[in-house]
Amino acid sequence: MRRAIIGALIPVLIFVSMLFLSPCASANGLIDELGNAMVREFSPDCLVFTSAEPIGDDGFTSHLHLAVEGGKIDKLRVDEISVEAFNVRFNPPEMWQEKLRLEAVDEVRLAARITEKDINAALLGTELDEHWKNVHIDLRPKEIVAIGVYQQSFIFKFRFLLKLAGELEIVDGNKVYLTNYRFYANGFRISQETTDKIVEEIQPILDLTNFVFPAKLKEIRLSEEELLLYSDPPPSEISGGVVWSFKRDRVAKCDDAMVTEVDRSP
């Protein structure tokens, strides 16, 4: 009789234990799946994803923070990205392998650091024709300058040193435009009408419309080595919660320092 009772109780105990354990196991599984989806989205060197709570089966979390080093936005390497978001709902988890999308969010805060070195590396990867030489970007505290040599051969060889200089302005909260710009050829300023037509072809110079987290940018800061972008307020890290991290094999070390409020100091 005792064995019969125990034998009958075992399936019940197993079923009850599954009721308690399966939500946790499922949540942990979703953390891994979401973290891997973030890696596919950003192709980062390092990534740390923190959720204030386990990710729900519907792709919901009330509060998250994402720290990315060496990630990519639209083929441009971004040295550091920091994102904080509230009441986030992603598309269904079964679709994350194909594409991670944000279906709803109350607020997104963002900070990003883009270096002059990475901008110029991206320029090297663009398809410029054979007439262009030594094209590069020079960041300065008040403006951004694009410099390049254009040469063309007819009967004689013509060579022009071209320079486009201007300030940066945030438009619609998710685009960066060149403004107050000037265009020079061999030191002589080109007419504004011609300059407008040239610049129109490259605007906006940075577009976050398709960025997975729809942050509204508020501030740009320039120095001789980097460009900083901020929402207002900027993001903050989360204390506690569920943490998921990634480091690419070839990366020796991940730097814990991310773009913060300190970087905004004059």
Image (cartoon, rainbow, N blue to C red):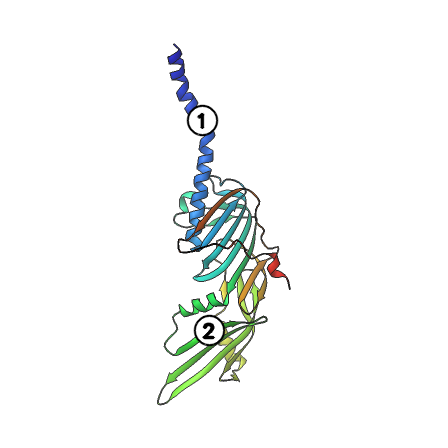
Counting from the top left corner in percent of width and height, residue 22 is at: 44, 32
Q: Which residue is mark 2?
A: 136
Marks 2 & 1, CB-CB < 8 Å contact: no
Of all residues, the one furthest to the front in this rendering is 252
151 up-or-down from 44: above or below: below
101 up-or-down from 181: above or below: above
> Separation of disc 2 and disc 1 at Cα?
62 Å
Say few, some or many: other residues with alpha carbon within 10 Å of mark 1 (under 14 / 14 to 19 / 20 or more).
few
Query: Quarter-wise, where is residue 156 in the image?
Result: bottom left
Q: Which quadrant: the C terminus?
A: bottom right
Counting from the top left corner in percent of width and height, residue 227 is at: 54, 65
Of all residues, the one furthest to the top in this rendering is 1
In the rendered structure, the answer to whether residue 11 lies left or right of residue 113 reads left
Of all residues, the one furthest to the left in this rendering is 155
Counting from the top left corner in percent of width and height, residue 111 is at: 55, 57
Q: Which label sits on residue 5?
A: none
Q: Which residue is mark 1?
A: 17
Q: Indicate which disc, 2 or 1, sits on the residue closer to the N terminus.
A: 1
Of all residues, the one furthest to the bottom in this rendering is 155
Q: Secondary structure at mark 1?
A: helix
In the image, 189 versus 230, the foreground residue is 230
Q: Is residue 161 visible?
A: yes
Q: Please state which amino acid type lies under the numbered disc 2.
A: His
Q: Please state which amino acid type lies under the numbered disc 1.
A: Ser
Residue at x 53% of width, y 61% of height: 113
